[in-house]
Amino acid sequence: MGYGALPSKFLHPSWWRIAGREFIAEKAAAIAFRSEVIDLNVEGTPLRFQIGDPTGASWYKKDSLDNEDIRHIETYLLAEDGSSIVFEIGCHHGLTTTLLSKRLQNGQLHAFEAMPDNLEILKRNLALNQCDNVVPIGAAVGDRSGEIRMKSKSNSAVLAGAANGPSVPLVCIDDYVEQTGVVPDVLKIDVEGFEINVLEGAR
């Protein structure tokens, strides 16, 4: 592949300087990182929350957190008696998952997380907060069932083409509903650009 085929950003020295600084900062954070459980209060909900990797620390270890997603879902989408069935697709370490669980007193949450390390932290946070109405599922979600490759990052995304990366199970919502008989009232999707594929498998 000639230079003419490369995205133009790769031809600018400034892009390489910024990328280099980010790479060094990421590696330094990983070396210094120690997992811990902290107390959070998000949208009036107290939580015990495991900070499981440097990305989680940068996102969740803050003096104050708000969650506009939760406010919108609770105000406009959930049944008033908390009986909704919610499918959360892309959970990371489960901050939104635990918040939704607390708002579904009579409902259920099916939490899909593709990356195995994230899934284990998610399960730990569900246990810490007694989220017994959550069904964690270790799979990516798309327009078919099978397998798919992911980036090897905490905030992962689906890899295009035949790029190298860990292979994880892939499910589509239509197949999951047919197999389980559980039909969602709400889909909450955060999958780093793969949202259309999720919806194509949820007809």
Image (cartoon, helix red, strand yellow):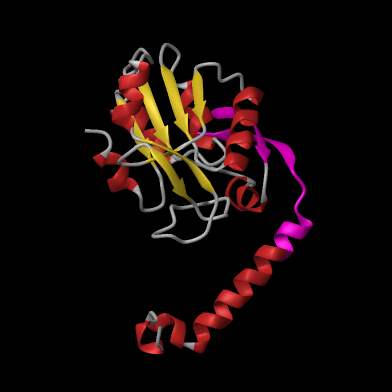
Q: Please provide percent x and percent y for residue 76.
A: 28, 29
Whether residue 113 sits left or right of residue 177 in the image: it is: right
Stretch of the chain drawn in magenta? 28-51
Instruction: Work out which residue is located at the far left of the displayed protein and give it.
Output: 203
Q: Please provide percent x and percent y for residue 165.
A: 53, 55
Q: Please provide percent x and percent y for residue 185.
A: 29, 23
How many circles with numbers are drawn on the protein? 0
Whether residue 16 sits left or right of residue 26 in the image: it is: left
Q: Please provide percent x and percent y for residue 31.
A: 77, 59
Q: Is residue 150 above or below residue 3?
A: above
In the image, residue 53 lies in the stretch drawn in magenta: no
**What residue is at 44 percent from the left and 47 percent from the top?**
148
**121, 197: nearer the viewer:** 197
Q: Is residue 4 above or below residue 147?
A: below
**What residue is at 59 percent from the left and 40 percent from the top?**
116
- Tell me if residue 47 can be seen: no
Q: Is residue 90 above or below residue 1?
A: above
**What residue is at 71 percent from the left and 60 percent from the top?**
29
- Tell me if residue 169 can be seen: yes
Q: Quadrant of residue 161?
A: bottom left
In the image, residue 47 lies in the stretch drawn in magenta: yes
**103, 87: nearer the viewer:** 87
Quadrant of image for the N terminus:
bottom left
**93, 62: nearer the viewer:** 93
**113, 142: nearer the viewer:** 142
Q: Quadrant of residue 203?
A: top left
